[in-house]
Structure formats: structure tokens, C-alpha cells
Amino acid sequence: MDAEGGNAGEALLDVRGLTKIFGSLRACDGVDLKINRGEIHALLGENGAGKSTFVKMLFGSLEPYSGEIRWKGDKVRITSPGEARRLGIGMVFQHFSLFDALTAAENIALSLDDGSPIGTIAAKAKALSYSYGLPLDPYSLVGDLSVGERQRIEIIRCLLQTPDLIILDEPTSVLTPQEADKLFETLERLRSEGKSILYISHRLEEVKRMCDGATVLRHGKVVGHCDPRQETAASLARMMVGSEVSAVTRPPVDTKADHSPLLEIRDLSRKAATPFSVPLRAISLSVKAGEVIGIAGVAGNGQGEFFEAVSGEALQDNAGSVRISGKDAGRLSISKRRLLGAAFVPEERLGHGAAPLMSLSENLLLSRYSTDRKAFLGPLGTIRTATIESASERIIKHMDVRMSGKDPEAAALSGGNLQKFIVGRELDRQPSVMVVNQPTWGVDAGAAARIRQALIELARGGSAVLVISQDLDELFEISDYVAVMHDGAMSQPFAIAEATFEKIGLLMGGAAPEQAHPVGEIA
Amino acid sequence: MMRIELIKRPQHSALFSALSPIIALVLTLVFGAILFALLGRNPVTAMYIYFVSPLTQVWQIHELAVKAAPLILIAVGLAVCYRSNNWNIGAEGQLTMGAIAGSILPVLVPEYQGVFLLPLMLIMGMAGGALYAAIPALLKVRFNTNEILSSLMLVYVAQLFLDWVVRGPWRDPQGYNFPQTIQFSDAAILPELFPASGRASWAFVFAIVAALIVWFLMAKTLKGFEVKVIGQSPRAGRFAGFSTGRMVLFAFMVSGALAGLAGISEVSATINQLQPVISPGYGFTAIIVAFLGRLNPIGIIAAGLVLALSYLGGEAAQAAIGISDKTARVFQGMLLFFVLASDTLIYYRIRLITSRRAAGEAALEHS
């Protein structure tokens, strides 16, 4: 197919020298980018490289400091998302903006300002969704839909406005591999219709597979334009990070060492606490000393509820349903579970793992006041500030946490650096059981490698490590065994050597284990 | 076109934390002066009478301490509550119930005048306030009731209960049918600090000691840390292993106990008997004191003195230039308004925006 279409040689979008400054930070610094008609163009970069800032300027949510945007050959100023839509630019956000309690059609109607009756919109949305192979029931409640289905609503909502350019921000981060394949088919269909796509991702394999061109950002600057099909994943990663990312090494499990189970979960069930939370269904799992077990699953399949039940933020009815270091812990509070040797890292950093407006040393006390009572607290429960501050400095040094000033508030750190601190805070006490939810979500590659390596080393040192993650690459990198969560139930764990993306993907999508098991018969 | 915009600061500003109460005070004075001018009085004279003349003699300083004591006591307790994100608006009711509970001995057993009488009265006063504060706390923990409404409504219950008590069962039989109890015996009266120069009593000492203890609790101990964590981010508090339910009860009962102590101290030291009205709204004014003092017990001591001055100034202005003493309420209201408004500057900075920039930034808020 001729990608250039009728206007040969003229780019659909031509951005030159786009710059955005926040205070002293140049979030985007003279970014050039060109997208032709019918092109899928990737925007690559680590977290904080300026990708989001750049697309927000394209979509009219932020105003550029300098630089120009040429749209279909004309210089334009995009002052609002409404203006962007009028020009023909649509966007599907990474974090969906849908109301759980409304139907799909109602959500779509909310974003259209034409006032057509809901029935018409529903019919149009349904027809469009089927024609693109993204079937959607417009009358279903958003709260009942899976993440993949919610994304379909966002895409359909975007397509209803017949855009020429569609911006997709990390679209596959919430999808199973099979759902992602479905999405790729849709994108290729759109390309064949002459529509252009700006595809933001950090998943290099899919960029290589799908995209015709790529622009790589680092620290707000363009470090290169390339044809991703001509590159390797490693060369793209090098461009993004700027240096070789040290590979995580996973030494084999020492078969001679003691492998008694340190964390046992037996027949753990939990009712849904709210209409939109997931009930847990008879989960059993045992994590032995020396090994890392990874739990895969699409977001919102009960991982958060599972974490709360294991950590003790939510108590169980049955004391034996969670056992830590050989003791029944199901009725114990999170502090008592910590005293049994367990450590926990929740998914949310700000507001859950750390209090945003408190200093790092205060946030160290947050999870360690019970286990380190003797060192951190004096008589009458007085806080030994000096001891805590020096412990906090030790963690900062060990994990290479970068920050400005001494002992800043947690909210002042970048996500990756705060995550290094929160993980380091728990590693520092050498826990015998470590449970981590999304250890490297939103963390740059260098920091992620460091956190992953630290988790493996903790396990090889004789601890039991349980990692919940949506990032399959990460799980393949660090796990000895993988189990999959779907709709509040968990599959049997299987050795990483027997795992494939297809098998895990099928389990993530809810296939019964027996269908997924014989790996050879699939695909 | 220009417009004003608030930009969130990456980290809260220590400078404006300290400055915001002062900005609020200055704005209150400016608008107070305008108010006096509109009432046809010379603003300079009026401000002098209001804010300076009540401080010119020693006995007046005593009066300031008398008024400041209950404000500081209550506000210090409220600070614990508000820091833990529990909105106790009912300190006036807890003060009333504390006064009633503390008066049980001197009213019903006037013949007991032993050395333990005063300590018992104070303890019973604190217990009365704490238990009364436990009602909205338990309702919140058990039924998720809005504590702002329940604690506020219980104020009126307490006041009407006091009214009934002094008109009914506890009325002084020799009191010519006035709605009041018998006078307390001397043993039941909280002594004055320096009787030669004025009326200031031990209540002021209690207030200062309470402020210092709560300051230590909040700044130096794990309990204070727990209060702050739960107040800032309850989820992080749960992750830390702190119980939000127990914190609701703790915060309400501490502030109720201090309000109760303020109530029985006021009745014992100043009024010497129970009457239908025992407080000029100390429990409500203390809310302003707590915020003006930045919820910091040491700041609250200073803020308590400022608000006590507004009471004295209101009385002085009424006597000297014939302005209703209700202006005190107006001042207090303006002060609270400006304190809360100035607090915005701690987390946001102000930027003037021209229309071209405005459009782009406004769009950001919608995305």
C-alpha cells in the first residue's frame, strides 16, 4: 500500500522544535517529529523522557513554550482538546476517563457535544465497534467490563469523531497478549484506511512489529529517528536509556539449601468489599525459601484484594488461610505479620506505601516502627530521629535514590526514586518473606533492573519472595515459578521454564488451566 | 484579559506556613478598620480601643488570661482531632457536659470539702467531656456517621440539658427561683494565681501545660506520628498498621476531655455555680484558635491570646464608643475566613495569567 496517499510528500503532522518548560525543567526540548498519512509512528522513551508532555501539547492540554505544529501543511495553534478534535486529532488515554456507574453508550455520549439521542449513539457505536473487530455492547455498565473492554469504549469514542490522527498512550499495558493482538489488527486496519497513529509505548517488541517509524526521546530531547523494523530491541533500548542496561541475572535455585515454605496461602477466599472490587476465590499458594514466585494477571483481577489479604490490611475469617514462617497469620494485623518476618510493598506509592507529605525518614518509620521498635523508639514511645535518619541515609545510599535536599517529602521524589526507597526500606531489614505488588511500575529501566536484581538476591539469600506484576517481561526475568490471577482465582504455579507468553496470556484471559496447559497444541 | 491562577507547589512552603496567620491577621485588621469607618467611627480610635486599650493595665492582662485559658485548652484538643482528620465541631457541647459532670460534687454533696474535692471535680469534668465526645466518635466508627453534623447537633442537646438541670433538679432552693445552682463552696473554687492583682486562675496554667504536653506528643512520639499519618493518608496509616477506628475514638476523647476541663475550670474559677449559659461560645471560637495556631499547640497559645483579645476588645468598644459587642463575632469570623484563605498559599502559588496562556492551561485542567 502506498502510505503517502494523495498528498505525496506532505506529512500529516510536522512538529518542529516543540519546547515546554516547567520551572527549571525542560520537559520537552526542541522536539521534531513527522508523521505521514497511513503511518504508525512510535514515540519511545523512558518514564519522564517527555512523551506525555509532548502528546499533551499535540492534544491541546498543554501550551508549548516555543516551536510550531504544522497540520496538513498549515501552521496551527492547538489551544484545547476540543480544538484538537475539530482538527482531527483523537486520543486514547492510558488511564481511562470513564464513569463506572454509567453504560458504555452513556459514557460515549458524555464526550460528544452534538446532543444526539442516546439510542442513535449506541447504534453508531455498536456498528463501528463490530466493523473494527472490537465488539462492544453499548448498554453494558462500565463497572462490569474488563479493562480491555473499557479500552474499546475509549477507542470507539475516539473513532466516532473520525480523526485523521489517533494518539494511543501505552495502550497494551493493561491488556493480555491476546487482547493486544486484537488491538494490533484494529490498528493495521486503521492504517490501511489511511489514518495515522502515534503510538506511545515502552514495549519494544510490539513497536518493532507494528510501527513504520519511531522517534526516541530522552530527557526531553530527541535522540534519534529510526525505522524500528531495522533495529533490534537491544539497540532501541540503548537509544532510550542512553547506556547499556545491565541485564538482571537469575542464578539457579540452590537445591541443597533449606526450602521450607515461608509463606503459605490455603484456600483463601474473600467477599467483594465494594460493588467494584473483586472477590477472591479459594486461592492456595506456597512460597518456599530461596525462590521467587511471580503472579501475572490483567489489572483488576483481584491482585489488590489478594495483596491486602496477604499483608493483613484486610483480616481473614480463618487464621490458617495465611501462614507466615509456619505460623497462622490470617487473624493477625499487618504489624504482627511484619514481626513474623514478612515485608510488604504495595502498588500505590504515594498515599499507600508512603505518606506523600512526610519526609523519607518518617516514611521509614511508617513500616518499621514495630519491627525496629528497640532501635527507632525510646521510652514513652518517643521517636529517635537521629537513628531513623541515619538508617534512611543508609537505604538511600544502598538503593541509589536520587533526590534534592536532605530528607525531602516523599511526594517530591520521582516515582522511580520513591519506589527504590520503598523497596529498599523493606530489603534493609532482610525480611524472610517479601510480598511486592508491581515492583517497577513506572520506574525507569536502570532503577527497575536494580530493584529486580535486589529481589532475586533476597530470595537466593534464603527468603521467600512473591511478586505480583502486570509486566510479563519482568516476571520472566525474575520468577522461578509463575501463577496467573483471573477474576479472583489463581492458577497452579508452574516453572518458568515451562511458561510461554501464549500460555500465560490464555490464563490471563480466563481460559481454564487444562486448555492452557498443553503448550504445544496452542497457536 | 488577566486572570489569577493557583499553581500547585511541588513541596509545601515553610515560609507561607509561618506567614499565613500573620497575613490573615493583617487582612482582618484592614477590613476591621473599613468596617468601623462604615459604621461612622474613626477607624484609628476604634482600633486602638479594640486592640490596645484592653492591654493597658495589669488586671486587664489577667482578664486576657481568663478568656484565653478555655480557648487554648479546647483548641489544643481540637488540633489533635483535626490533625487526625476528625472534625469535632462540638467542643462547646463537650465543655458544657464537662462543666455539668464536674459540678456533681459541689452541687449535690456540698458538705464534702476535702483536699481531693478539686482534683475530683477536674477529673470528673474531663471524663464528662470525653464521654460526651465519644458519642459522635462511636457513631462515626460504627455507622460511618458524619461527625461534623453529629458533634454539632450534640452541642444543642448539651446546652438544653444544662438549661433543664439548672431550672429543674439542681436549682438552688434559696435562689429566688433564678435558674442557677447553689454557689460552690470555697474548697470547690479553682484558686487565683495572684489574687492581689487580678482574676487569672490555675486554668491558664492547665492550658499552658496541656499545650506543652500535646506539643510533645505530636512532635516527638509514635502516637503523634500515628495521628499525623492517619490524618494525611488513611491508607498509608492502615499499611503502617494503625487503626483508624481507634484513632477516631482517641482524638475525640482527648479533645472532649480538654473541652470538659475547660468547662469545669470556667465554672469553678469564674462563675462559681452553674447557670443556663456558662460560655460565650468558647467551644466554637476555639476552632478559629486551632486554625490560626496552625494546629500547632505552641502556635495555639499565641492564637488563644489573640482571640481572647477580640472578646475583651468587643466589650471595650461597646463601653467606649457604643458599638455592639457582636463585632467581636464579626472579627472572629473574618479571622477564620482569612486564615483558611491564606492557607491556600502554603500549597499553591499565585500567578497572573494573560488570556493567551489562560486558554492552554484551562484545557489542561479538563484533560
Image: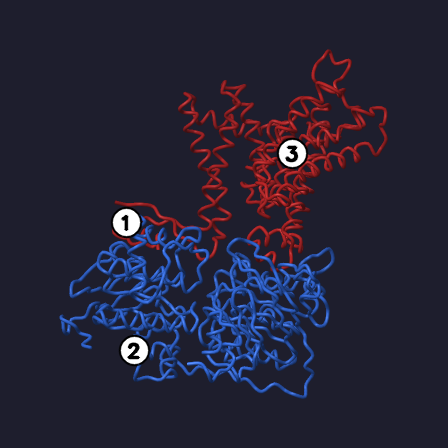
Chain colours: A blue, B red
Q: What residue type is labelled 3?
A: Pro
> Which chain's residue wears label 1?
A
Query: To which residue does mark 1 refer?
Result: A113
Secondary structure of the residue carrying tag 3 is: helix
Residue found 54% across the figure and 53% down from its top: A274
Residue found 35% across the figure and 63% down from its top: A135
Spot occupied by residue B347 in the image (x, y as percentages of width and height) = 46, 51
Q: Are marks 1 and 2 in contact (CB under 8 Å)?
A: no
Q: What residue type is labelled 1?
A: Asp
> Which chain's residue wears label 3?
B
Q: Nearer the viewer, residue A362 or A366?
A: A366
| Mark 3 closeness class: few <14, some 14–19, many ≥20 residues within 10 Å | many
Which tag, 1 or 2, sits closer to the chain's start?
Answer: 1
| Mark 2 closeness class: few <14, some 14–19, many ≥20 residues within 10 Å | some
Residue under disc 1 on the same chain as residue under disc 3: no
Residue A224's disc number: 2
Secondary structure of the residue carrying tag 2 is: strand
Query: To which residue does mark 3 refer?
Result: B70
Q: Quadrant of residue B111?
A: top right
Q: Nearer the viewer, residue A116 or B195?
A: A116
Q: Are marks 1 and 3 in contact (CB under 8 Å)?
A: no
Q: In which quarter of the image is residue A392?
A: bottom right
Secondary structure of the residue carrying tag 1 is: loop
